[in-house]
Amino acid sequence: MYKGYWLFIVIGLGWSNIGCSQSSKQGKAYSMEDFESDSCFQSAGVSLAILDILNDSILVALKPSHALPPASTQKILVTALALKVMGADFQFQTRIGHTGTIRHDTLFGNLIIRGFGDPSLGSAHFPETAWNDVMEALVKFVSDKGIRHIAGTIIGDASFYGLDAIAQTWPYQDLANYYGAFCTGLNFHDNKHSLHFKQNLTPGAEVNQLEIAPEVPGLSIRSLVKTGPRGSGDEAYIMGAPLQTNRYVRGTIPPGSGTFTIEGSLPDPPYFLAYHLKKNLAARGISSGEIQANYENTLDVVEWFGTLNSPALRRIVNLTNQNSINLFAEALGMRAQDSLAVKNGDWMIDFWAEKKVDMRGCHFEDYSGLSPFNALSAQAMVQILRIIHEDQTIWPDFLESLAVAGQSGTLRSFLKSTKAEGRVFAKSGLISGVRSYAGYMVSESGKWYAFDIMTHNSACGAQQVRKKLEQLLETLYLSLP
């Protein structure tokens, strides 16, 4: 198979035929009519566009103005915005201080750990900010002040955002699972825990023995899980909501004689951090009183005596797109909004509209793309991708954050062993009923193209949709001049 050259004719920016302007080499013919007539997509919502960046012209379009749920491709907008607004070297901070006085070796007052939205604190994704390093640093800040007794309360202070920041349109079945971890002013340990099940060999048997790790104060989880058939995978979902400590888990896990692990979200991240800091202080001989989480009140801190800095923003952006981490995307979007001091819920739409992007029909309920109520059109996405490509203040770091087809991130196995491997840089998106891909293609001639394809409510299964979109993108790539 080798590449021919095809003329793309867009009809009214509605749907397009790929007509034949055939070179001496026989290319791979494809008509968008074939895609539209596929039974998998006949009843689905589809929005597709490919943009020639150099000429700012749409080459291929299929209902490009239709706004559909973008799923995690929405992270493209958020990560680019974060780089633009805050800069690639920006670092989040977490501070520790007190509200009272220190006399001799006793703090007569409360110990405050105040977060400013850092999603990397205690994260397993960054070795330098992992759990043990954070706890050691916080304990050292306290001991270096000569404190051996805390007469007041240890408060995990998440008031930088408050409870209004909790997403209101995420599906209930997602909230208690790791990918549904909500972002607070004070995050810790990726705002998640592990749930270890003792497996059963008999399909259909109940799975009642489980362990929560690390310890989550107050959390109880009732298991309704059963053993799935042989060859099945993880089909277990934890059910619960933010701040809710009485949860249950349902579904199936594969049969076996060992331990099977899933991950859930923390019900109260600042309380969780305060609890484990109290335990670590006690292990170093420093006594303390109660623990508390604060989301709403402004606490008057007398003295700040320690600050923890996050890794540079470019590294957080990289992981956000490469690994599609919802918590990181939420943290980036919330901090960008705070940095711009905008209260309008449609501020992201306004931001891109001011850059002459047609955002009609678009709206956003969160920053990660987990909400099924988000809406974005392919024509808006490719224009945003063009703007990002042309902005050299953010382009190198942004490009580095995208997964590479057949090589890295969520696209490691996508377009593997095809001519497009290593030449497609993109973000994938997947939520219930939605499959999307957006990013860049570099043709064999070296030209850059922005593309976006979204499907919503396809009639076939997720893996079939993935395969069909992979075949479509390969064909379109081979047809690029």
Image (cartoon, helix red, strand yellow):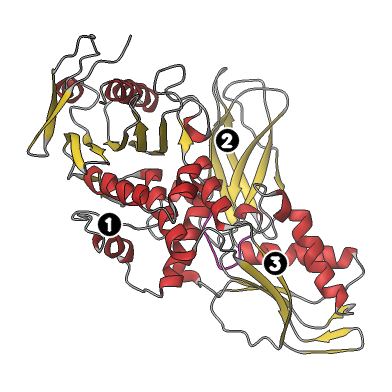
Q: Residues within 10 Å of mark 2 (few under 14, many from 20)?
A: many
Disc 2 versus disc 3: nearer the observer: 3
Q: Residue at x 52, y 60 (%)?
A: 183
**Front-most of 239 and 298?**
298
**Front-most of 452 and 70?**
452
Can residue 192 be seen in the rendering of this structure? yes
Cα gap from disc 3 to disc 1, whole angstroms:
35 Å
Q: Residues within 10 Å of mark 3 (few under 14, many from 20)?
A: some
Can residue 215 be seen in the rendering of this structure? no
In the figure, is residue 139 to the left or right of 98? right
Q: Position of residue 66 (x, y in %)?
A: 18, 44
Please tell me whether mark 3 sits on a helix, a strand or a loop: strand
Queried whether the magenta region covers residue 315, the answer comes back as no
Label 1, on which residue? Answer: 363
What secondary structure do most residues of the magenta stretch adopt? Answer: loop
**Label drawn at residue 225:** 2
- Vertical arrangement, residue 63 with respect to residue 239, above or below: above
Q: Which range of residues does the magenta coloring cover? A: 181-187
Q: Residue at x 11, y 37 (%)?
A: 14
**Label drawn at residue 308:** 3
The quadrant of the rendering that contains the C terminus is top left
Please tell me whether mark 1 sits on a helix, a strand or a loop: loop
Q: Amino acid at mark 2?
A: Val
Q: Position of residue 42 (x, y in %)?
A: 18, 27
The quadrant of the rendering that contains the N terminus is top left
**Front-most of 195 and 319?**
319
Q: Amino acid at mark 1?
A: His
Q: Position of residue 389 (x, y in %)?
A: 36, 47
Please tell me whether mark 2 sits on a helix, a strand or a loop: strand
Say whether marks 2 and 1 touch (CB < 8 Å).
Answer: no
Quarter of the image where one finds residue 5: top left
